[in-house]
Amino acid sequence: MKQEALAQALGTNQQAISAMENSENIDEEKLKELAKALGMTVEAIKNFSEEAVINYFNNIYDNEISGSVIAPQSNNYSFNPLDKLVEVYEENKKLYERLIQAEKDKNEYLEKLLDKK
């Protein structure tokens, strides 16, 4: 969520959100408002872990591929999420390279057609 959108949801401005992000502590009342605006619980914010988020979304992604979506039951994974991210990046990179080459080929073909006219 962008700072501007969060600021609007909290009835404040972008600078206040930026200051909140840079502070080490947020008072409990402001934390409750923040959790409500983000659609989550105060406990979820307090127990936030980047690793847990990556594992959660990797699990959803892997389950969607197999045809089912279930909530993760544990954080014991036998793969490194960063390796998975690099793998997906490389696959997408190859796809984009093929798409770019197809567009170049199409443009060359159209230029040849135009030159003939």
Image (cartoon, rainbow, N blue to C red):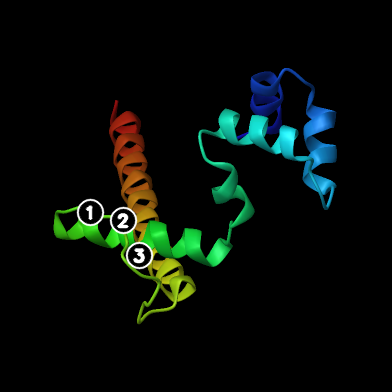
Q: Please name the amino acid that badge 1 sits on.
A: Glu
Residue 103 to residue 3: above or below: below
Residue that extends furthest to the left in the rendered view of this protein: 67
The answer to whether the residue labelled 1 contacts the one labelled 2, judged by CB atoms less than 8 Å apart, is yes
Q: Position of residue 49 (x, y in %)?
A: 58, 62
Q: Foreground residue, 13 or 34?
A: 34
Q: Which amino acid does label 2 sit on?
A: Ile
Report how far apart the C-alphas of labels 2 and 3 lie in the structure: 19 Å
Is the C-beta separation of discs 3 and 1 under 8 Å? no
Q: Mark 3 points at which residue?
A: 91
| Quadrant housing residue 72 | bottom left
Dot 2 or dot 3, earlier in sequence: 2
Q: Position of residue 93 (x, y in %)?
A: 42, 61
* Viewport quadrant of the C terminus: top left
Instruction: Give SS at disc 2.
Output: helix
Residue 36: x, y in percent?
57, 30
Label 1 residue SS: helix
Give the mark nearest the N terminus, 3 or 1: 1
Q: Mark 2 points at which residue?
A: 60
Q: How crowded is mark 2: few (under 14 residues within 10 Å), some or many (20 or more)?
A: some
**Which disc number belongs to residue 64?**
1
Q: Residues within 10 Å of mark 1 (few under 14, many from 20)?
A: few
Q: Residue at x 24, y 55 (%)?
A: 70
Question: Disc 3 to disc 1, how far (Cα)?
Answer: 18 Å
**Count of labels in the image:** 3
Please give left or right for residue 48 compared with residue 104 in the image.
right
Q: Are marks 2 and 3 in contact (CB under 8 Å)?
A: no
